[in-house]
Image (tube, rainbow, N blue to C red):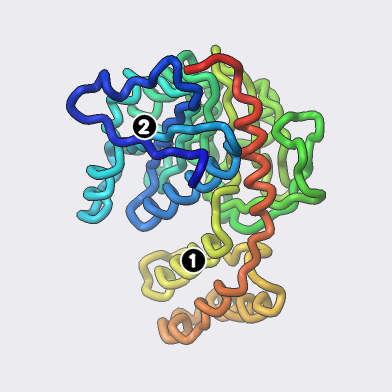
Amino acid sequence: MVALHLASPVSGNRSAARPDPQDARWTCALVNNMPDGAFAQTERQFLELLDVGSGAQGLDVRLYTMAGVTRGRDTARRIAERYTPFADLFGHPPRLLIVTGANPVEPVLEDEAIWTDMVHLLTWASHAVPSMLLSCLAAHAALTVYDGLPRKPLPGKCTGVFTQQVDHRDPLTVGLVPNPVLPHSRLNTVPTHLVRAAGYQVPLRSDEAGWSVATRRVATSHVVLIQAHPEYGPTNLLREYQRDVRRYVRHERDRPPVLPQSCSAPEDRRRLEELQQRLTSGERDPVLVESFPFADVEARAPWSWRTTAEQLYANWLANVPAGVR
């Protein structure tokens, strides 16, 4: 990484962590709430998009995570070595804030273990942070906190890569490739018409998956909500599917897995559909899964949204409100 600098965690003398007012570099807080299995990968994916999107603009990033997510030894060590205590974020307001999604555990969002911290962060940031980007569960939390819009469970998992309808008037869509696509992976949603009624612009949406990006000003902050997952790598959806398949054949879950749309190379689609058909027909044999060539399928998976993701982040950073923080 060239333009992006990962700042050291705050420790001991807090005043040393305050940015130099003469420093032209922007400050960004990344709050990573993903579970252990995706924690390091999520950190890397968001940092890579920030690095590409920031271009020549210097960007200092500090990492945070909320309490409430159970951590294993390796992730706890990573947090201790690389992450700043969450409470210190409020004493050092960044110019930019990114809050990742989290693994949904509770049917009601307000019952999630991170909910109290999330409400505090979003309420504070709307007055203290010039621009924020909120992903997945964090985006749904913002709609609840800012607009009183609760998420609603979907009848089935929304998963796949979906073609986007583009509002070319919005600055976030400048320079996007024709017919862009973005991946979605979620169990809940807030309907597009309610998001628009609350005053949000919807620069990217899918007829099948709903809104992907929504934006409006909240208090003094420019807020970008992302219900899609532009940060995903080419194999994320397939690995989520493989995880759900394994849980299903082991009787760890009762609902059959949902095969993601357009997640594989064309030559692998029929093979995946055949596997899905056997599973939904009641064939819950672990041998069926163990013999499936998931590694080969993942190696051929396309990354059709990468250029769109990079341009989206570049556009977000290019439209941060003026003023150094």
Q: Position of residue 248 (x, y in %)?
A: 43, 70
Left or right of 88, for residue 220? right
Residue 115 badge: 2
Q: Quadrant of residue 217?
A: top right
Mark 2 residue element = helix
Front position in the image: 249 or 91? 91
Mark 1 residue element = helix
| Residue in view at x 60 percent, y 45 percent | 228
Q: Position of residue 51 (x, y in %)?
A: 53, 43
Q: Of the residues shown, which amino acid type is indicated by label 2?
A: Trp
Front position in the image: 76 or 101? 76
Q: Of the residues shown, which amino acid type is indicated by label 1?
A: Arg
| Residue in view at x 27 percent, y 52 percent | 75
Left or right of 6, for residue 229? right
According to the image, label 1 marks what residue?
239
Front position in the image: 75 or 154? 75
Q: Position of residue 192 (x, y in %)?
A: 68, 35
Front position in the image: 205 or 41? 41
| Whether residue 75 is situated above or below residue 66 in the rendered picture | below
